[in-house]
Image: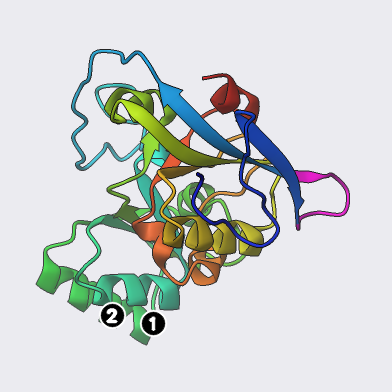
């Protein structure tokens, strides 16, 4: 049987999946797909390596997008908390070349102690990379998410047999996404599919709602929820 899910979800019973509405924007129905999959065939496995990326953040040698590798945290207090947490692997900091302030000095001091690379960029570039032009405060951190992977990589790595994943489709409220990630991880699901289309990025709001679980959760990235259900 499927592991217990959040109260607003119902596990599949007989059919391959069950669909239940979740809290989300009032403008569009938000759906989650609890999928129990029997994997019968596996593609040849391959190994992904995490590491620094170019200043352009154009992805790695295998064409893997930075958004499928890192969780980008912006804002001085969130970045400070990340740098202080030695259990998190920080790939790099990117700082606006005009950024100043006491908190920034503290962040840079801690980054130096931990050997975290620090790069500078124009304020506009930092805003673009953060994806939030009002709250970046001139700094962001790329945190390595060790269990984040693409849908193809997940299918390659999953063990033969049955596993359960949760597919989010149209759940675009960051707080709801964070709570769902936390609940699904606690329930022992193999992963949470977070499509690039129609889903928020994993930002400080998602991290806060997940109580930090999102950093280490099994998050599966793909283009759409339908693609994941089909796969």
Taking the magenta stretch, the answer to whether it contains residue 26 is yes
The structure residue drawn at horizontal position 48% and vertical position 57%, both measured from the top left corner, is 123
The location of residue 109, given as percent across then percent down, is 19, 77
The structure residue drawn at horizontal position 47% and vertical position 70%, both measured from the top left corner, is 75
> Looking at this view, is 169 or 34 the one in front?
34
Q: Is residue 129 left or right of residue 10?
A: left
Looking at the magenta stretch, what is its main secondary structure?
loop
Residue lying at the far right in this picture: please name it. 27
Q: Is residue 35 left or right of residue 169?
A: left
The location of residue 26, given as percent across then percent down, is 87, 54
For mark 1, what is the residue?
101
77 relative to 14, above or below: below
Task: Count neighbours of disc 2 (C-alpha within 10 A) and say few if under 14, some if 14 to 19, many if 20 or more.
Answer: few
- Residues under numbered marks 1 and 2 in contact, where contact means CB atoms less than 8 Å apart: yes
| Element marked by disc 2 | helix
Q: CA distance from mark 1 to mark 2?
A: 6 Å
The magenta span reads 23-30
The structure residue drawn at horizontal position 32% and vertical position 70%, both measured from the top left corner, is 82
Quadrant of the rendered structure where residue 67 is? top left
For mark 2, what is the residue?
105
> Looking at this view, is 210 or 67 the one in front?
210
């Amino acid at each position: 049987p499927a592991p217990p899910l959040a109260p607003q979800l119902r596990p599949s019973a007989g059919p391959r999946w069950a669909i239940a509405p979740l809290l989300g924007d009032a403008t569009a129905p938000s759906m989650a797909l609890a999928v129990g999959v029997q994997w019968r065939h596996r593609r040849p496995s391959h190994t992904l390596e995490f590491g620094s990326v170019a200043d352009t953040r154009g992805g790695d040698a295998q064409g893997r997008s930075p958004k499928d590798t890192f969780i980008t945290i912006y804002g001085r207090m969130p970045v400070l908390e990340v740098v202080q947490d030695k259990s998190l692997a920080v790939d790099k900091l990117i700082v606006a070349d005009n950024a100043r302030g006491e908190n920034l000095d503290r962040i840079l001091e801690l980054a130096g102690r931990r050997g975290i690379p620090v790069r500078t960029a124009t304020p506009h570039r930092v805003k673009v990379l953060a994806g939030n032009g009002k709250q970046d405060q001139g700094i962001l951190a790329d945190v390595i998410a060790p269990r984040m992977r693409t849908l193809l990589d997940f299918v390659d790595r999953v063990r033969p047999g049955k596993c359960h994943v949760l597919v989010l489709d149209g759940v675009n409220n960051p707080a709801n996404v964070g709570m769902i990630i936390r609940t699904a991880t606690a329930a022992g699901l193999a992963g949470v599919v977070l499509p690039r289309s129609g889903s928020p990025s994993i930002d400080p709001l998602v991290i806060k709602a997940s109580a930090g679980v999102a950093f280490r959760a099994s998050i599966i990235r793909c283009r759409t929820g339908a693609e994941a259900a089909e796969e």
